[in-house]
Amino acid sequence: MSIEKDLFKLKPIAYTTMADQVENHLREYIIKRSIKPGDPIPKETEIAQALGVSRNVVREALSRLRMLGMIESRKKRGMILTQPDVMKGLELIIHPTILDEHVRKQLFELRLVLEVGLGDLLFRRKSEEHLKKLDAIVEREHKATTQIERIRCEVDFHSTLYEMAGNETLKRFQDILMPVFEYVVEYESKLDHTSVGSVTHADLVKILYSNNAEAYPNAMRKHLMPHLDHL
Amino acid sequence: MSIEKDLFKLKPIAYTTMADQVENHLREYIIKRSIKPGDPIPKETEIAQALGVSRNVVREALSRLRMLGMIESRKKRGMILTQPDVMKGLELIIHPTILDEHVRKQLFELRLVLEVGLGDLLFRRKSEEHLKKLDAIVEREHKATTQIERIRCEVDFHSTLYEMAGNETLKRFQDILMPVFEYVVEYESKLDHTSVGSVTHADLVKILYSNNAEAYPNAMRKHLMPHLDHL
């Protein structure tokens, strides 16, 4: 094969700025040195000197890590690695209006998957308080007269389930995805057929009061079937 | 109540840099103006002038959005909003060694929830090719003689399920969480009891060959039970 043809096989070089490179260096440094949350990281001037770049470039890279919640400045201690909020990066990106239809649909599917699978956490961590909260939502839903009130109850019911699951990371994931869900629920409510699953919120609460964890996944599937049928 | 006491109730002011503020302004601007992926965003100099800040500060804020994959520079077109990779921010943060035990556990739970709930996507999108791939992994697992080979098969089997689910966002989520799972699987494999669920990979494949979507969630629960029992 001629050199010319070989050349065409090369992939274009990814456009990386100096800040990108410094950022990657810092990530590698943190991982290779096994720096733990709470441990100090080198000073801006030290990094600049070690990598042979300007302080401005280092500042830009550190600024990114700070935005992600990975590092923090502490008085007298300089910068330290923090225990990052793993969902922070997701939160910074997800906003329903800047997501296209395709991605919104995928996130909605993700929600359906989560809710069907949630049972084991719910049965292990349910409390009287949570169950009563669900009861109250079901009652409020029965009395609802407008579509908006019904959507509110729908959202409250499912949010309470995530609360009940006792997993902060999962709850936070759900909170971030919430605007996307509301977007889809509103969209679906505008469709002519107001399809409701054969298992109601009240039925789900009854199962949660019981200790029948095996009944949960298929009950939730039936509850969500109108959405699942949209897939 | 005296003013002094009232003062103590005030929350400390969050430390925000100029770049934080410009970044927030840009986010609001994008959302309020309903800027869509592909649309241009104002130039660095325009932003600096409009907000009355230095170009350096604007550059720092734009650098963050670029890192998250929210904006891109295009030749002759200046900067445009991109369709962001929603999982990019997650990828930038998650690395098992910088997560504490507690967060790792929560992410592992999240995985268990996802796999139990995955059935409906699998049954809607399974292909002959995927099923054969699972068959091959099961066969490879039967022949495995070392713990490392078995862990490799375990990881391959579950990754293939995510592939089969036909949801790129979910697959990407799984890929990012993978190092965390491997970490837990390795940890568990070091425990004395090598606990195996009552439903094997071969049993799961048999269900996937059938059209019995209802059997899936509880079969997967039984398969994962040793992990679920750890909760």
Image (tube, coloured by chain):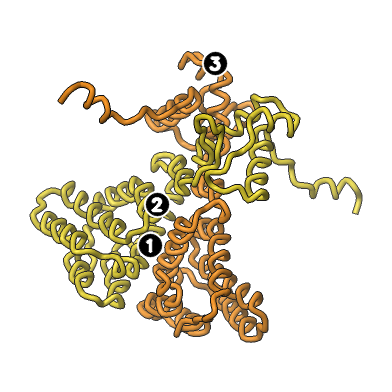
Chain colours: A yellow, B orange
Give the image location of residue B134, x and y in percent.
57, 77
Q: Position of residue A184 (x, y in %)?
A: 32, 50
Residue A60 screen position, x and y as percent: 60, 29
- Mark on residue A173? 2
Badge 3 density bin: few <14, some 14–19, many ≥20, Cα 10 Å:
some
Q: Which mark is residue B54?
A: 3
Residue A229 in sight from this viewpoint: no
Residue nearer the viewer, B6 or B75? B6
Q: Would you say the residues marked 1 and 2 are in contact, meaning their CB atoms lie under 8 Å apart? A: yes
Q: Chain of mark 3?
A: B
Which amino acid type is shown beneath numbered disc 1? Leu
Residue B32 lies in quadrant: top left
How many badges with numbers are in the image?
Answer: 3
Q: Percent position (x, y) of residue B129?
A: 58, 74
Q: Is residue B218 left or right of residue B163?
A: left
Residue B56 is tagged as none
For marks 1 and 2 on the same chain, the one whose residue lies earlier in the sequence: 1
Relative height, residue B208 to residue A72 (above, below): below
